[in-house]
Amino acid sequence: RNVMVIGLGGTGKWVLTYLKKSLIEASNDYLLMTSALDQTLGISRAYFDERYNAGVPEGIKLLAFDLDITTPQRPTIDGGAFSLDYDPLSSPEFASFNQDISASIQRIKDHSPVPQLGSWLESDDAYRMTVPRTMDETGAGLQRQYTRSCLLQSLADPYNLRKLPSLIDAAIADFQQRRIVHPNLATYFFIVGSLAGGTGAGCFLDVAQIVRHRYAAAGLPTTKIFGVFVL
């Protein structure tokens, strides 16, 4: 199977961190078992390392998607610190969609047009929003409108090279390569997060729509999208 798990907000980052830990530990257990078998069959260790010692199993993609760029406390594997890859420029496992939306919110308050936001965010709602002072370390602050505003503005930002659709496209491209060898592989997407906060609750429907749109744009059969949420 091909599986992509998208974690939204702080809860999503926690879930993906422990999921990655569990996947690697399961892979290590498989590594030990298969190593003994391969050595019995006379297969070289170099072949084994190249084939099996790759961390998260092939066909599984993890992507944490959040406003807050801070890293959760790390669980450990064999006593060593462990986390997702949070490199802001190249990580395949994390992307921030935080945006400075203060100017856009002010324009909506002034009843001026903002194409990416004005079709759904009304002036009264804009007046009730509080834009966090530290944009990249506070998250949505339980404000769902703030989350959706950042997401929509990030999609329209020409300087944002790590948009969610592009990251999903990269995963789908890898899945397509696997389907060349295994054409009957099913593909599943899981969206995980919390409905009690501001980030996950503010964007989970949009993220599901983006996944469905990008999968269809690749010309692939219908996929299944599952939501796993906590309160």
Image (cartoon, rainbow, N blue to C red):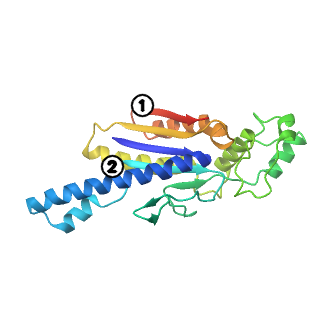
Task: Calculate the distance from the C-alpha at mark 1 to the C-alpha at mark 2.
Answer: 17 Å
Horizontal and vertical percent for residue 114?
79, 43
Determine which residue is flagged by label 2.
Answer: 177
Please name the residue shown 54% across and 55% down the image: 94
- Amino acid under label 2? Gln
Crowding around mark 1 (Cα neighbors within 10 Å: few <14, some 14 to 19, many 20+) is few
What secondary structure is marked by label 2? Answer: helix
- Quick one: quadrant of the N terminus? top left
What secondary structure is marked by label 1? Answer: loop
Crowding around mark 2 (Cα neighbors within 10 Å: few <14, some 14 to 19, many 20+) is few
Residue farthest right in this picture: 110
Can residue 57 be seen by looking at this rendering? no
Determine which residue is flagged by label 1.
Answer: 222
Q: Is residue 6 positioned above or below 90 on the image? A: above
Q: Is residue 88 positioned above or below 156 on the image? A: below
Horizontal and vertical percent for residue 127?
87, 40
Q: Is residue 116 left or right of residue 63?
A: right
- Quick one: quadrant of the C terminus? top right
Please name the residue shown 20% across and 55% down the image: 34
Horizontal and vertical percent for residue 197?
67, 40
**Of residues 14 and 104, the one drawn nearer to the viewer in this rendering:** 14
Please name the residue shown 64% across and 52% down the image: 97
Horizontal and vertical percent for residue 155?
64, 47
**Mark nearer the N terminus (1 vs 2):** 2
Can residue 93 be seen by looking at this rendering? yes
